[in-house]
């Protein structure tokens, strides 16, 4: 009784030092930093990475798409998407109780960080996911069609899947391990990219006409920005400045390095020379593949995941382009889609604490074996893959009927920069 009275008096005298949801300054500072890093991944990181790979007549179109998606998704997130993803709702979708950021004030909390910071951090994930898909239909889709597609896709694919995994939905409750977006970001973007590449069709001249990157210097600069920004992506997903964040940062770096080296060596063996585009693409494969596992595995497991990513994503890229002849222009599905699937599966193994030097941090609550965790991972992979493919196909077909998806053959040959934006990336 005496202790209760003392606590009550203390609370009355010092109301700003409440006991519930007390702000942690260190965690808040780290997530503010991580938020800036993840935004930096899209603009300018992804924009430069993609912009350098396309032909010079389309460089501005890619930069414009990434920039416009950033602006549009930010407004939609404020309007309703944050609420759909992260309010209680039901197992499938959140409600609209926080539409227009209702109730999100400078004093509202998400755990021990301000909800404004949490919402902004999650917004940066919502921005980069549809921006990744741009690589699948680069150099041929109408700007208007791209904007409509991105808005609808965010609403009916990204927001629901985010809720299933991170917002209190059925996959998270089942015990799916996805620390930073193997399913939410990489599988959804990768599968959507594959569907888009098929529905939109090949670029004029593919695969007979060579379409080399116009500025690999820009691509390497963008790749470096992605690598650095990814520390915010993965380590920031701990939502705290703690050991989980530190481990996530370490394993992210190791996997990126291993993915880059594995791709480089595989390409060297197959084609006789290692390429700059190959090593940076392998790095992205390593980063995407470690993303779902980054908070659950140890350094040795991360090394295996990165090496696997470099080799398997290299094989997938060659198979898609050279055998199936699908024009996923900037290799979104074989790098992000295959990487997301691989990482989401392998975390079910390397999260185990019974693998010696390869041990991780343990399975989801209530799960006691690798086989049980892998079962949950496979359910998550399969459902997200099928749902994303079907819904993306419907969206694209509807837009094609309404306004058409791609520019004309003559406009494509001339280049999207001048046709769609009346500008040129380079004045000679």
Image: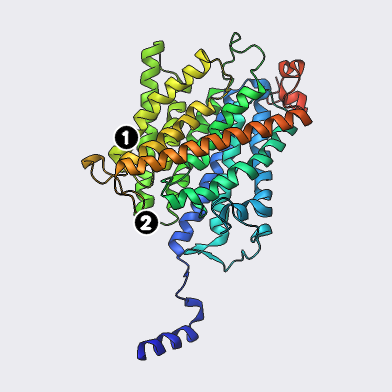
Residue 278 location, quadrant: top left
> Pointer 2: residues within 10 angstroms few (<14), some, or many (20+)?
few
Q: Is residue 369 above or below residue 422?
A: below
Q: Which mark is residue 242?
A: 2
Query: Residue at left 35%, top 54%?
Result: 365
Question: Residue 40 vs residue 99: left or right?
Answer: left
Instruction: Where is residue 14? Give x, y as percent.
Output: 48, 82
Q: CA distance from mark 2 to mark 1?
A: 22 Å
Quadrant placement of the N terminus: bottom left
Residue furthest top in the image: 208
Q: Report whether residue 152 is seen.
A: yes
Residue indicated by mark 1: 303
Query: Residue at left 50%, top 28%?
Result: 220
Closer to us: 400 or 7: 400
Residue 308 location, quadrant: top left
Question: Residue 246 vs residue 130: left or right?
Answer: left
Question: Residue 187 vs residue 265: left or right?
Answer: right
Quadrant placement of the C terminus: top right
Query: What kind of colouring is applied to the model shown?
Result: rainbow
């Amino acid at each position: 009784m005496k202790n209760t009275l003392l606590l009550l008096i203390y609370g009355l005298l010092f109301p700003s030092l409440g006991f519930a949801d007390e702000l942690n300054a260190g965690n808040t500072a780290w997530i503010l930093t991580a938020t800036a890093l993840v935004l930096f991944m899209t603009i300018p990181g992804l924009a430069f990475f993609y912009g350098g790979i396309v032909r010079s007549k389309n460089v501005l179109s890619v930069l414009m798409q990434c920039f416009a998606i950033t602006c549009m998704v930010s407004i939609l997130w404020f309007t309703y998407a944050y609420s759909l993803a992260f309010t209680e709702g039901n197992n499938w979708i959140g409600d609209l109780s926080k539409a227009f950021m209702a109730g999100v004030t400078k004093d509202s909390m998400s755990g021990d960080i301000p909800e404004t910071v949490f919402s902004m951090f999650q917004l940066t994930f919502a921005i980069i996911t549809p921006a990744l898909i741009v690589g699948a239909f680069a150099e041929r889709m109408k700007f208007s069609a791209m904007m409509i597609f991105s808005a609808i896709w965010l609403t009916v694919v990204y927001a629901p899947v985010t809720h299933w995994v991170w917002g209190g939905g059925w996959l998270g409750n089942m015990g799916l391990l996805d620390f930073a977006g193997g399913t939410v970001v990489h599988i959804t973007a990768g599968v959507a990219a594959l569907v888009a590449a098929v529905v939109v069709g090949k670029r004029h001249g593919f695969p007979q006409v060579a379409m080399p990157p116009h500025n690999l210097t820009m691509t390497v600069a963008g790749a470096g920005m992605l690598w650095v920004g990814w520390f915010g992506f993965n380590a920031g997903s701990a939502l705290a400045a703690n050991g989980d964040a530190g481990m996530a940062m370490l394993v992210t770096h190791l996997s990126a390095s291993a993915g880059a080296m594995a791709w480089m060596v595989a390409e060297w063996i197959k084609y006789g020379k290692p390429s700059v585009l190959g090593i940076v693409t392998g790095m992205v494969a390593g980063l995407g593949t470690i993303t779902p596992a980054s908070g659950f595995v140890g350094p040795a497991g991360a090394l295996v995941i990165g090496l696997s990513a470099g080799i398997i994503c290299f094989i997938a890229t060659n198979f898609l382009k050279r055998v199936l002849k699908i024009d996923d222009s900037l290799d979104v599905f074989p790098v992000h889609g295959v990487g997301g699937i691989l990482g989401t599966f392998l975390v079910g193994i390397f999260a185990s604490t019974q693998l010696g030097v390869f041990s991780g941090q343990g399975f989801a609550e209530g799960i006691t074996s690798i086989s049980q965790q892998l079962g949950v991972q496979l359910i998550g992979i399969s459902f997200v893959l099928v749902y994303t493919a079907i819904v993306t196909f419907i969206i694209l077909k509807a837009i094609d009927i309404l306004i058409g998806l791609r520019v004309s053959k003559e406009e494509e040959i001339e280049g999207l920069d001048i046709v769609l934006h009346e500008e040129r990336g380079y004045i000679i």
